[in-house]
Image (spheres, rainbow, N blue to C red):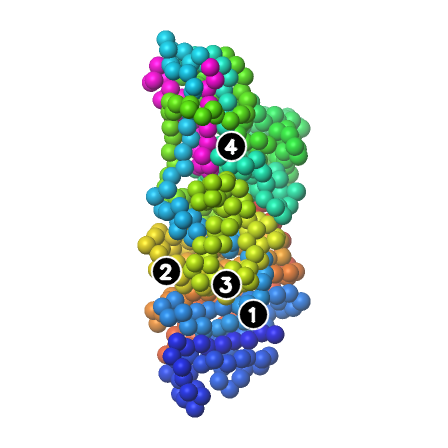
């Protein structure tokens, strides 16, 4: 049963209800399938939008509240649990800022149990990660340069990759097996590597160019260069103007990457991301290459193990702050950032870099902000798991509460901003609600899984009234995303003094959304 309600902080007598609506106050009520006598114009228009046939046989929650007072302006099924997809990141990101703090930094250390003597380390060299999801090849180069500056020329022992700060559970509970090769479902390791400044940790990039003539094998380059991923290339160059059918997939349980299909002659370079099996060894391989480039020779092999107690730090790399991380994390909806933050919170607060420990911290933080955590289930940090269940009531409660946090403005700015084409401003909303009152106004987190879409955040009305809202839709066959946008535009356009004309119900279209943030499509989407 759907319902709409107005809830005021100040009790209003029933006899004044009609006058209160006219004055813009709040009245508690229930709405059936047709507008009731005391339904407000905003409620009526939102009801009209949500009668869209995309919702036939599916579920939709929508809650709108006043950001200053917390008053509920609209509530349709706000207590129902639905899959929120990446709206889960609202809880993870807020908890990370609240628990770790915006100044928190990850780090990666190089250690040894033997001192540097005559340019040699007479023992193993340890590369230990502390959960940094933003480590780049350049950072491993900088670590190698620090060792060179310290006089290291030769390591007599092995290069040891240590990712023991987190547990060895690589993939989240409930993640789809067929996503394993896709960049948005990479393995979680405390020692890892991102191939570029999108910071998709645990992935590498396969760059493709056509051959010299049709029928020739395509030309492939791995970024960064490494000896862990092994490419099997059966892709060929197609005729000019032919279809691009290139497929890049890593085989389960291995680092064998198969490239197949056809890539047209004369086409521009293609960039596709692929995940890595056991990313700590991938990071160590790239670091070993950086050592060699600095003239530092490692005589032993590369292996995984734990750093002995008492090992001395010879070099250190630090990440950007967690506050700064919010921008690539939230703008591009980076799943791996979410899970690294979860495990880091578990390690910092409970001494266990695990999903159960970290998710308990996230849940505790939400509870401390007034969220009824007994009515929700947080199963991972990113929302990639279909076991996650949130309510629009819970989301809007969190959105209201975090406005009082000292870091709120940094977090608010990190949310995608509707209609802004700059990918590090608009993020996953860059192409949505352009040239409308919501553009450069609405700040919100998107969410997408097959059969699930969500949008929750903040928007300012035409009257200058700031609202929080949360809309979650599940189990549809025709995407209701245009309705999400219409809701955002209606709220941005709203004036209690001069309500806009009734919003047009958007045309439906069949959903073909992949299991990732389809607003920001990369290779595997």
- Residue identified by numbered label 4: 164
User: How many residues crowd mark 1 within 10 Å: few (<14), some (14–19), many (20+)?
Assistant: many
Residue 227 visible somewhere in the drawing: yes
Q: Earlier in the sequence, mark 1 or mark 4?
A: 1
Percent x, y of residue 262: 65, 34
Percent x, y of residue 127: 46, 25
* Magenta stretch in the rendered image: 123-151
Q: Residue 403 got which mark?
A: 2
Do residues under tags 1 and 3 come within 8 Å of each other at their CB atoms? no
| 247 or 399, nearer to the observer | 399
Percent x, y of residue 450: 62, 53
- Residue identified by numbered label 3: 372
Q: Quadrant of the N terminus?
A: bottom right
User: How many residues crowd mark 2 within 10 Å: few (<14), some (14–19), many (20+)?
Assistant: some
Do residues under tags 2 and 1 come within 8 Å of each other at their CB atoms? no
| 429 or 319, nearer to the observer | 319
Q: CA distance from mark 4 to mark 3?
A: 34 Å
Q: Earlier in the sequence, mark 1 or mark 3?
A: 1
| Residue mark closest to the camera, 4 vs 2 | 4
Do residues under tags 1 and 4 come within 8 Å of each other at their CB atoms? no
| Secondary structure state at the residue bearing disc 4 | loop
Q: Quadrant of residue 3?
A: bottom right
- Residue identified by numbered label 1: 77
Q: Earlier in the sequence, mark 2 or mark 1?
A: 1
Q: CA distance from mark 2 to mark 1?
A: 24 Å
Do residues under tags 4 and 3 come within 8 Å of each other at their CB atoms? no
């Amino acid at each position: 049963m759907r319902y709409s309600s107005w809830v005021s902080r100040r009790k209003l007598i029933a006899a004044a209800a009609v006058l209160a609506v006219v004055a813009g106050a709040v009245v508690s009520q229930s709405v059936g399938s047709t507008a009731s006598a005391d339904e407000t114009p905003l409620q009526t228009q939102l009801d009209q939008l949500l009668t869209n046939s995309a919702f036939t046989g599916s579920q939709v929650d929508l809650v709108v509240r006043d950001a200053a007072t917390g008053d509920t302006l609209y509530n349709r099924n706000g207590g129902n649990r639905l899959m929120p997809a990446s709206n889960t990141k609202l809880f993870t990101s807020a908890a990370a800022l609240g628990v770790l703090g915006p100044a928190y930094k990850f780090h990666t250390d190089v250690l040894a149990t033997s001192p540097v003597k005559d340019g040699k380390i007479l023992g193993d060299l340890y590369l230990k990660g502390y959960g940094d999801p933003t480590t780049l090849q350049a950072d491993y180069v900088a670590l190698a340069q620090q060792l060179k500056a310290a006089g290291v020329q030769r390591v007599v022992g092995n290069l040891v990759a240590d990712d023991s700060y987190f547990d060895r559970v690589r993939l989240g509970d409930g993640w789809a097996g067929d996503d394993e090769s896709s960049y948005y479902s990479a393995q979680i390791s405390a020692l890892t590597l991102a191939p570029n400044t999108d910071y998709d940790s645990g992935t590498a990039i396969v760059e493709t160019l056509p051959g010299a003539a049709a029928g020739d094998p395509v030309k492939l380059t791995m970024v960064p260069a490494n000896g862990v991923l092994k490419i099997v290339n059966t892709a060929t160059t197609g005729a000019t103007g032919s279809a691009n059918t290139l497929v890049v997939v890593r085989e389960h349980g291995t680092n064998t990457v198969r490239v197949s299909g056809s890539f047209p002659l004369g086409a521009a370079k293609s960039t596709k991301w692929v995940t890595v099996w056991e990313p700590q060894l991938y990071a160590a391989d790239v670091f070993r290459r950086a050592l060699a480039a600095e003239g530092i020779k490692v005589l032993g092999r590369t292996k995984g193990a734990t750093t002995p107690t008492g090992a001395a730090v010879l070099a250190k790399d630090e990440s950007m702050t967690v506050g700064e991380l919010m921008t690539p994390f939230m703008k591009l909806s980076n799943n791996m950032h979410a899970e690294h933050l979860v495990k880091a919170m578990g390690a910092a607060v409970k001494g266990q870099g695990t999903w159960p420990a970290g998710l308990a911290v996230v849940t505790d933080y939400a509870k401390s902000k007034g969220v009824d955590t007994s009515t929700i289930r947080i199963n991972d940090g990113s929302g990639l798991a279909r076991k996650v269940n949130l309510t629009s009531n819970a989301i809007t409660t969190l959105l209201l509460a975090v406005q009082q946090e000292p870091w709120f403005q940094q977090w608010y700015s990190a949310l995608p901003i509707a209609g802004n084409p700059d990918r590090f401003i608009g993020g996953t909303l860059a192409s949505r609600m352009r040239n409308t009152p919501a553009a450069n106004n609405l700040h919100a987190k998107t969410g997408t899984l097959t059969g699930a879409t969500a949008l929750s955040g903040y928007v300012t009305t035409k009257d200058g009234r700031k609202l929080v809202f949360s809309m979650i839709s599940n189990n549809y066959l025709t995407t209701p995303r245009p309705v999400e946008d219409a809701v955002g535009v209606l709220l941005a356009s709203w004036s209690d003094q001069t309500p806009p004309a009734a919003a047009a119900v958007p045309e439906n279209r069949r959903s073909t959304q992949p299991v990732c943030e389809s607003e920001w499509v990369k290779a595997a989407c």
